[in-house]
Image (spheres, rainbow, N blue to C red):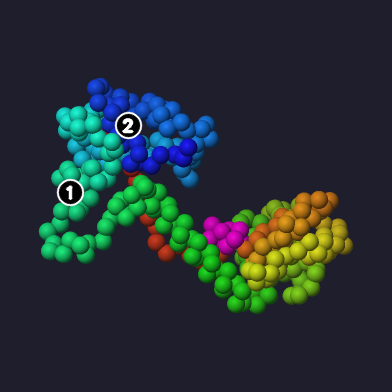
Amino acid sequence: MPIPTYQDVMLPLLQAAADQEVRVSEVVTQLSQVFQLSASEQNTLLPSGRQSVLANRVGWARTYMHKAGLLSSSRRGFVQATDEGRHLLATHPLRVDNETLMRYPSFRAFRSLDRDIEDKEALTPPPLLAHPTLTPDEILRATHEEMEAGLAAELLQRIWAGTPAFFEKLIVSLLIAMGYGGTVAQVDQALVGGSGDNGIDGVIDQDPLGLDRIYVQAKRYAEDNPVGAGAIRDFFGSLDRVKASKGLFVTTSHFSASARETAEHLSKRLVLIDGKTLARLMIQHNVGCRVQETFYSKAVDEEFFE
């Protein structure tokens, strides 16, 4: 079954801490069994790779119930239900969620919804209420992914509006930014081909010493015009003529299934980069885009307070 949301784990977390102080990590293990999570679901990590998704959601459930006065914590990694929390459990609730927590003044104050304004209906709901199944950091990641998706689409639009020569130069610039070839000053030196041919558009050193080289083919195709197997075979022939053992084929569109199959079965190593991957790499290496603003996600340093 799917990994439970942070609201789904509020009630079982409160129940686990009802009679005694419990270790949160042990509750996470118990909940994985209660919700019958597979090994894969239990081991699903956040993008940072530092914490499981389930543990993160249990952590946020603990934080919110603590803000509502339902849980307390006397030492690191442990929680226990307060008198208010046990009182809530005595009513045998079927579920504890954001709506439940909003009954408590301390939680409403935490969410900054008790501001003295006349038109409360005009107040924009905080992300917690606008996305009730997501934790704040999940909302932040989803927003970041949405922004990057929009940026990627705009980058591809700019490339389509440019010239084939600009596209070829962009690919070499990206490879240099990724650590291949040398310096930005060497971009023009790496361009060897002309637009519209079936030859080599660029040659760049794979390592700083130039012990091996990467031969590049760049196709600035529209999104609905995939690269077919014929273009792959043509590029293979070009590599063969220069006695190259590997090549990089980049397009702004995508590769057909036959093109990918052809590349896999050829005797030379061919790496295929489609438009989506190209845009992602440009964003990752700040090619054609730049950092506009930086946000840091911070958490309490538990060791500092021990």
Which residue appears at 27% of the width and 45% of the height?
98
Residue 158 occupies which quadrant of the picture? bottom right
Question: Is 108 contained in the magenta span?
Answer: no
Q: Mark 1 points at which residue?
A: 109
- Chain-order first, disc 2 or disc 1: 2
Which residue appears at 79% of the width and 61% of the height?
229
Tell me whether the residue at label 2 lies in contact with that at label 1, contact meaning CB atoms closer than 8 angstroms.
no
Q: Where is residue 132 in the image (x, y as percent from the top left)?
A: 33, 49
Q: Main secondary structure of the magenta part?
A: helix
Determine whether, in the image, residue 61 is placed left or right of residue 43: left
Which residue appears at 23% of the width and 50% of the height?
111
Q: Which amino acid does label 2 sit on?
A: Pro
The magenta segment? 276-285
Which residue appears at 37% of the width and 40% of the height?
57
Mark 2 → mark 1, Cα distance in angstroms: 25 Å
Closest to the observer, 202 or 278 = 278
Q: Is residue 205 visible?
A: no
Residue 180 occupies which quadrant of the picture? bottom right
Pointer 1 local density, CA inside 10 Å: few below 14, some 14–19, many at least 20: some
Image: 129 above or below 30: below
Q: Is residue 287 visible?
A: yes
Q: Position of residue 59 (x, y in %)?
A: 34, 37
- Residue at disc 2, secondary structure: helix
Q: Mark 2 points at which residue?
A: 12
